[in-house]
Image (tube, helix red, strand yellow):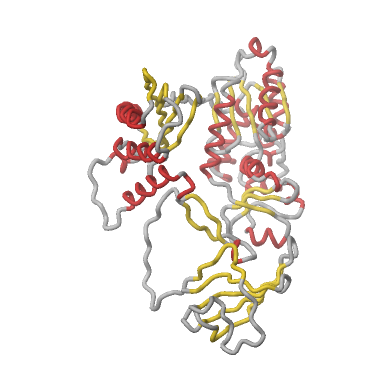
Amino acid sequence: MDRTACVDLPAFPLQWLLRARPQWRAGPVAVVEADSPRAAVLWVDERAWNEGVRPGLTYGAALALCGALRAAPVPEGEIEREVSRLARRLRTFTPHVEPSREEPGVFWLDATGLERLFGSLRNWARLIHAELEQRGYRASVVAGFSRFGSYALARARRGVLVLDSPAEERRAARLVPLPRLRLDPRALETLEKLGVRTVGEFADLPHEGIERRFGAEAARLHRLAAGLLELPLAPERPQPPALQRAAFEPPAAEIPRLLAAVERLLPPLLEVLRQRGRALARLQVGLRFERLGDHLERLCPAAPTLDARSLRELVRLRFEAQRRLPDRVVELVLVGDGVRASAEQWRLFEGRPRRDLRAAAEALARVRAELGEQAVVRARVREAHLPEARLAWEPLRELPAPRPRETAQGRLVRRIYVPPLRLPAPARHEPDGWMLRGLEAGPMTRVLGPYILSGGWWQRAVHREYHFAETQKGELLWIYYDRLRRQWFLQGRVE
């Protein structure tokens, strides 16, 4: 008899966030839609739930309920990459794995015929559970007979469960609390008022009334629960990577010989991706040295591309930045990671605007290839108490289009020093004023302030008295007096 298993990693984005920031595990944590007080809360852990924080609240409202709450957004791309990594790992236990597209962290596995390989299905399920726990995830693994039955039981419990018969699976699934399923909260509230609290009670309702009252999604779930709809397993069929390799005899000792091999291997590599309807998003260049072993370089073009010329340029910049090879190269391997190509990427001719964002992105890609991935970053404003902590630097992957706006007058820009610069203490009897920036800038002629910033009791107490100081030469400086350290600092300047 065919066996189907379900693996569930509950609140998968929240688990991903806690793995990325393990120091947050001790306190209440939430996943938010964006790094903004108005952003919606998407997922909460048990401590935050006990404090009254619920999904759907704004981040600001959640902080009002739980001052110790820590929250951050989870990039959708990171979730997709982690799901792909977990799916690859699960394929070592069974070749047929289907990740859920609607619920990240849910996987269906074909468990048919694995008893002889692993001794029993219980051993197989325990090995999967142990693998996920070793990776830092809480998970449930249920080996049953149907897609819906194994899913419902995986959502309702933790650990490992192996069912012995379809009848046992049906009985157990009917007892699963209805809120464990992916059902609209308003529908759940209405069903609760009707006394429908379990999957079995929901499955016993007439199908026509479900669709008319709660919509198509609830009707589809009802058909699955009642056994009227059975979806077959649709496992992913991962294609082998686009790969080209070249062996050197005698081993290559000079960079030009490697570049010539790259120029020869790139066209067939890109042709494989083109036939799959994909464009190259990342190029991995593997080198096998004679004595030093294997080495891997990763290059990302400005945008997914099938242009061999721009890729050759990126490889050339990366190799020439090293000036010389540390050892002779025995083998060169190129691996292309592709993404689905858009219609624009297939277009041969296109008009170029006055500001060519593609040319700018290619220039930044060349900078990254020569100086490293962290050479091109942008500032992002974040919530913080101190001015120098309000900016975070993140890699710039995509150059946004300019959005100029007409203004009646120019804006002043505040440039911040990180860390703040220590200033000499003002003399008590200085007839010409305080020399903030030395003799060249001249003495201070005008001061606005103080503007007091006080707080930080949750980590380290802070009391600063900020001023805007204008010098004789026209510089407008942003300074503050640290009351606790009894020292003046230059925080920045205004231009």
Q: Quadrant of residue 11?
A: top right
Q: Quadrant of residue 117?
A: top right
Up-down relation of residue 117 to residue 88 (above or below)? above
Q: Residue furthest top?
A: 116
Q: Residue furthest bottom?
A: 431
Q: Residue at x 25, y 52 (%)?
A: 352
Q: Is residue 483 left or right of residue 480?
A: right
- Where does the image place residue 290, in percent across and percent down from the top left? 46, 22
Up-down relation of residue 180 to residue 171 (above or below)? below
Q: Which quadrant does the N terminus fall into? A: top right
- Where does the image place residue 121, in percent across and percent down from the top left? 68, 17
- Where does the image place residue 235, in percent across and percent down from the top left? 51, 25
Can see residue 153? no
- Where does the image place residue 316, in percent across and percent down from the top left? 35, 37
Q: Nearer the viewer, residue 152 or 99?
A: 99
Q: Residue at x 59, y 25 (%)?
A: 90
Up-down relation of residue 60 to residue 122 (above or below)? below
Q: Nearer the viewer, residue 351 or 453?
A: 453
Can see residue 65? yes
